Amino acid sequence: MAGAPAACDRGVAGPRHDPTGMFMPGAAPVTAADRRRKRIAINVSMLWLLFPLLDLAGSHPGLLRAALALAAAALFVAIYNWLPRDRRQARPTSGVMLSLAALTAIAIVLTVAERQTWGLLFVFTAIAGVMRLSRREGALWIIFCACLTTATLLPDHADDGTTISLAATTLGIGFMMFAFRRLMELNQDLVEAREELARLAVSEERARFARDMHDLLGHSLSVIAVKAELAERLLAREPARAAEHVADL
């Protein structure tokens, strides 16, 4: 019986990984392979930036302009990858807020000063905020990014179709990621609930084992006490029977 709780402990107390891509309370850090997979997934989504990059290449810009645009885009991708992912804080950390401000500034500058197709950066800015802010703040951040997309493109004389398309994309993908984050949180809650149930099952098994052991030891000690008392009484009158009881002990 002692082996069962030990086996259960090994199944329950092992390191828990964070399936959401954000460090969860009580969760062990993800493995190097997990981090590598997340980085690949993040950067695969960056393939959308091929549209403004191809547009930039097709316009035959000057060397300095192209270098500045590429440097700004590379900085955006670097900040997006580095952005802290700690949800244990009750409020967003200063690092998160500064990173979101930097992403927003780069998106505005590239869209206004370089070309309108860089408006796609607002989509990634919305995603970065919604995955790291509280639910209420995340919803407001999506709306803010969509409005900022419109406010950035309209003064730049973008056509209505481009403006509506980028604003709707920012809004739609932002809320899709909002729902996806909620799904990941519920999944994490389910994992933690299952682990808690497993821990409770182990505790109950230990308590049952302790009760059985207590009853067994109590019965054995009672038998020992009775036989010892009986052997003591029979020792003077019937030594043979007293010897039998002592042998039983």
Image (cartoon, rainbow, N blue to C red):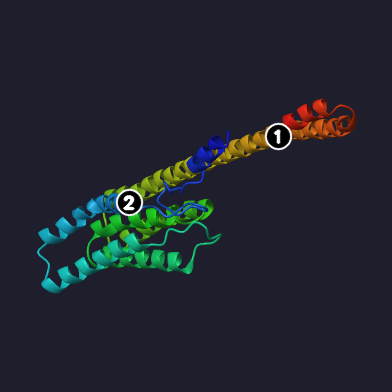
Please give left or right for residue 149 compared with residue 200 in the image. Answer: left
Q: Position of residue 78 (x, y in %)?
A: 29, 64
Amino acid under label 2? Lys
Q: Which residue is mark 2?
A: 38
Res. 190 in view: no
Q: Residues within 10 Å of mark 2 (few under 14, many from 20)?
A: some
User: What residue is rendered at 53% in x and 36% in y?
Assistant: 3
What is the quadrant of the N terminus in the image? Answer: top right
What is the quadrant of the C terminus in the image? Answer: top right
Residue nearest the viewer, comparing 236 with 23: 236
User: What residue is rendered at 22% in x and 51% in y?
Assistant: 47
Q: Position of residue 217 (x, y in %)?
A: 72, 35
Q: Nearer the viewer, mark 1 or mark 2?
A: 1
Q: Which residue is mark 1?
A: 211
Dot 2: element: helix
Q: Position of residue 6 (x, y in %)?
A: 53, 40
How much space separates mark 1 and mark 2, taking CA atoms?
48 Å
Please give left or right for residue 127 compared with residue 88 in the image. Answer: left
Q: Residues within 10 Å of mark 1 (few under 14, many from 20)?
A: few
